[in-house]
Amino acid sequence: MKQLQKEVDEYIGQFKEGYFSPLAMLARMTEELGELAREVNHHYGEKPKKNSEDEKAIEEEMGDMLFVLICLANSLNIQLDDAHDRVMNKFNTRDKNRWTRKDKEEDGQ
């Protein structure tokens, strides 16, 4: 994740404008989430695309979301690998018994 954040920072660093404000990036992330939701709905939901609509991959929309998330994190000096470690710790402690675990035999182990 550090490498991804560095790569995005180097890309944004080429431009005088730099990062947008956190609020503007949050609005952009919301916009990108809507585009992702639309693609998922077209592929797995009840709303097929119109013939006039371009085909966009779910992967591309997730990439857009990731880029904006990295921009937001960078602008706020948040290390996403640290944020990930914190949330995984939460899931492995507070929520450790929340879900039904697979038996090792079911897993083929």
Image (cartoon, grey):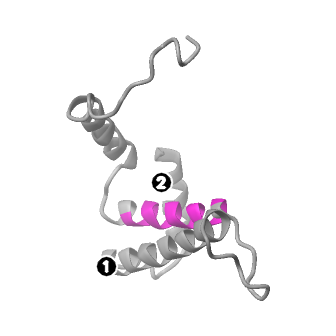
How far is mark 2 from mark 1, CA to CA? 19 Å
**Is residue 107 found left or right of 86 in the rendered image?**
right
Residue 42: assigned label: none
Relative to 13, is 97 on the left or the right? left
Which residue is rendered at x = 70% and y = 71% of the image? 56
Q: Which SS type dominates the magenta stretch?
A: helix
Q: In the image, what residue occupies the spot 48% across and 71% down?
A: 33
Estimate the x, y position of residue 77 in percent, counting from the top left: 31, 58
Residue 9 drawn at (x, y percent): 48, 61
Residue 62 shown in magenta: yes
The residue sitting at 54% across, 19% down in the picture is 107
Question: Where does residue 29 sit, x and y in percent of width and height?
Answer: 44, 72
Q: Quadrant of residue 100?
A: top left
Nearest the eye: 69 or 96:
96
Query: Within 10 angstroms of label 1, few (less than 14), some, or many (20 or more) residues?
Result: few
Residue numbers of the magenta segment: 59-72
Q: Amino acid at mark 2?
A: Gln
Report the residue marked by disc 1. 23
Check residue 15 for magenta coloring.
no
Residue that numbered label 2 is attached to: 5
